[in-house]
Amino acid sequence: MILDIVKGVAIGICASAPVGPIAILVIQKSLSKGHRAGFITGLGACVVDTVFSIVAIFALAAAEKIINEHRELILLAGGVVVTILGWTMSTSDPFRKLKARESSGPAVSVTDFLQAVFMGLSNPGAIFVIFALFAFFGIGPLDSSDWRVAPIIISVSVGSALYWFAVTWMLSHFRKKFRLRTILWINRLTGAIIVIIGLVLLGEGLFRILFMGGQLF
């Protein structure tokens, strides 16, 4: 059982490590708003990893079938969501946010958490990463009555949360070395990168529909 818990923590860390839209979002939040906002955003990603882990344990085959049958719809919807979030990031004003924080004290925005959740759920590739990690560490589909299920899922969440806590803590300390003008350009650059990722998802979805015979429903 201890080995399964260690494997779960490793899966949570490995699932969070790839640099993708969520990682870019966490970096942006940590540098522009501080450790707490960055960590809350990372917890949104942690929730998504937990959901995907539950799917991987209980319904691997069914999930793969649904994703393959509706890949075009997932790509188009995910592309729209990611593009909108990236555009919002690139046009936001970190100066106003930082001044508001200084005058009213530290605050945690639910929006930061929800942005990460929506971005994670809109990325169809992320769930395949979870599937691959479970297979790599030798954790296959389990029955709901198996007592190992809960500890494994919790350990994945813990691993993901630990990763994001460490990353956002380090980024928040580097934040002190940046000027406000630098943070503004970081916002714009990271937002632009996420917009590009969203447009790529949209383009792939449209390409599959127009040239590969894919269908939305």
Image (cartoon, rainbow, N blue to C red):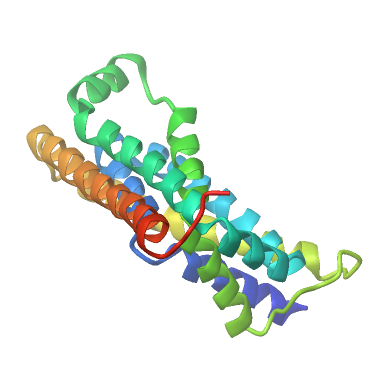
Residue 13, x across and y down, in percent? 50, 67
Q: Taking 170 as reference, is 155 left or right?
A: right
Q: Give the farthest residue toward the right.
A: 145
Identified at 40% across, 60% down, the residue is 208
Judge by depth and name the residue closer to the eye, 84 or 168. 84
- Looking at the rendering, in which quadrant would you find the N terminus? bottom right
Judge by depth and name the residue closer to the eye, 154 or 173. 154
Residue 20, x across and y down, in percent? 35, 59
Judge by depth and name the residue closer to the eye, 12 or 204. 204
Identified at 56% across, 68% down, the residue is 130
Identified at 31% across, 22% down, the residue is 101
Q: Give the farthest residue toward the top.
A: 103
Residue 70, x across and y down, in percent? 56, 55
**Where 120 falls versus 63 (above or below)?**
above
**Where 201 falls versus 153 (above or below)?**
above
Q: How many marks?
A: 0
Which picture quadrant has residue 116? top left
Identified at 14% across, 35% down, the residue is 184
Q: Taking 97 as reference, is 148 left or right?
A: right
Which picture quadrant has residue 141? bottom right
Which picture quadrant has residue 201? bottom left
Judge by depth and name the residue closer to the eye, 181 or 185. 185
**Where 107 falls versus 126 (above or below)?**
above
- Residue 158 visible: no
- Residue 201 visible: yes
